Image (spheres, rainbow, N blue to C red):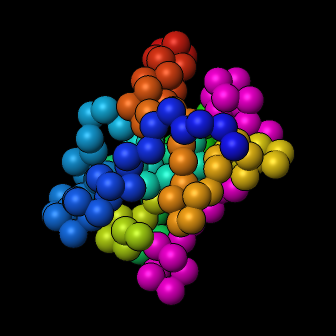
Amino acid sequence: MPKPLWAPWRLEYVQHADELDRCIFCDPEPGLLVDQGEHAIVVLNKFPYSSGHLLVAPRRHLSDFSELAEDEVLEIHRFAALAVDDLRAEYGAQGFNIGWNLGHAAGAGIEDHVHLHVVPRWNGDTSFMPVLGDVKVLPEHLLETARRLRARAAGRR
Ligand SMILES: [Zn+2]
């Protein structure tokens, strides 16, 4: 099994999950912000399923998926498509899971502000992302991943 380069995010989660009083989409951590447009933003998930797990959200603090406006839907979709391109180019992602988790019953961690998950996948990605007990090991620091993806986004402007 490959030696993990970095894995303290779970500890961070244990320390801060209960203290999260701000909305991570209305007030994103600058280091995790990847891209932003007029109606939507892209942030790196601090508690990812895999490296490069991105979240695309409307700028509006909105809990009801059906209330998304057309311009928001369009920009969110466009950002998701760009995320796919960038994760392919930067990390050689071979597949993607893209979707909305609406409501606690569906696994939504943040219900107050709807967001679209873009999760890159690799063939046999259990070896890319070793699972040790319930601790998923990420091969790259989150801030480095965000920096690389932010540079790609900036390269388009
Ligand atoms: Zn919000």
Q: Residue at x 46, y 73 (%)?
A: 108
Q: Nearer the viewer, residue 73 or 23?
A: 23
Q: Nearer the viewer, residue 118 or 122?
A: 122
Q: Residue 140, position in %: x, y?
A: 51, 33
User: Would residue 123 be found to the left or right of residue 105 on screen?
Assistant: right
Q: Residue at x 83, y 45 (%)?
A: 123
Q: Residue at x 29, y 63 (%)?
A: 14
Looking at this view, name the residue that lies furthest to the bottom. 105
The segment highlighted magenta reads 86-108
Q: Is residue 105 magenta?
A: yes
User: Would residue 28 be found to the left or right of residue 76 on screen?
Assistant: left
Q: Is residue 4 magenta?
A: no
- Does residue 47 sit above or below 4 in this rendering? below
- Does residue 28 sit above or below 113 in this rendering? above
> Is the N terminus in the top left, top right, bottom left or bottom right quadrant?
top right
| Residue 97 visible to the viewer | yes
Q: Residue 109, position in %: x, y?
A: 41, 70
- Does residue 68 sit above or below 41 in this rendering? below
Q: Residue 136, position in %: x, y?
A: 54, 55
| Residue 37 visible to the viewer | no
Looking at this view, name the residue that lies furthest to the right. 123
User: Would residue 25 be found to the left or right of residue 37 on screen?
Assistant: left
| Res 84 quadrant in image | top right
